[in-house]
């Protein structure tokens, strides 16, 4: 996650989840390309891998390595979380190829509108 707007997105997530009983670890990995940006331990003690993206127009710029990671880990707790203006869009890993092709026109698994209530975000991950 080298994009400054993605770094700001990470900070807003970290702040929003700070009052919850969760642990978030930002992953900065240059050896295993495609590894998601965030490891989240939810309130049920389940792990989630989350790729963070900020949409440019309607596009979501996923690298081939990121798409490959999502495809290999579909069916797991692996997600792509996209900030698009005031909305935050949650996509399942198995939606990665379509997300790359269609951008934010693709119907997300869940949409969070401003103000994002991060405890609601956790409820969606935990179900």
Image: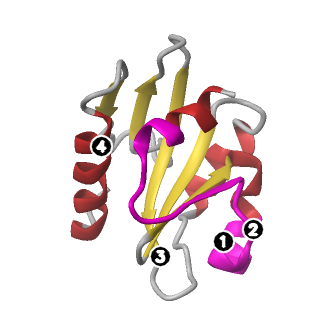
User: In the displayed structure, does residue 30 sit left or right of residue 55?
Assistant: left
- Alpha-carbon span between mark 1 and mark 2: 13 Å
User: Which element is circle 2 on?
Assistant: loop
Q: CA distance from mark 2 to mark 4?
A: 24 Å
Please tell me whether mark 1 or mark 2 is closer to you in this view: 2
Q: Which quadrant of the view contains residue 85?
A: bottom left
* Front in this rendered view, residue 35 or 45: 45
- Residue at figure coordinates x 56%, y 52% from the top left: 80
Quadrant in which the N terminus is drawn: bottom left
**Dot 3 corresponds to which residue?**
55
The picture places residue 103, in percent across and down from the top left corner, at 64, 77
The label nearer to you, 3 versus 4, is 4
For marks 2 and 4 on the same chain, the one whose residue lies earlier in the sequence: 4
Q: Which mark is residue 107?
A: 2
Q: Which mark is residue 16?
A: 4
Question: Magenta stretch?
Answer: 98-121
């Amino acid at each position: 996650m080298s994009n400054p707007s993605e770094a700001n997105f990470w900070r807003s997530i970290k702040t929003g989840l700070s009052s919850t009983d969760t642990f978030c670890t930002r992953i900065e990995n240059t050896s295993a390309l495609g590894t998601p940006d965030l490891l989240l331990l939810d309130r049920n003690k389940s792990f989630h891998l989350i790729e963070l993206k900020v949409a440019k127009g309607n596009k979501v710029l996923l690298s081939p390595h990121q798409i490959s990671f999502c495809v290999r880990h579909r069916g797991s707790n692996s997600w792509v979380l996209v900030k698009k203006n005031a909305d935050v869009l949650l996509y399942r890993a198995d939606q990665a190829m379509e997300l790359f092709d269609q951008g934010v026109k693709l119907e997300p698994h869940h949409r969070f509108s401003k103000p994002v209530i991060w405890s609601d975000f956790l409820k969606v991950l935990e179900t």
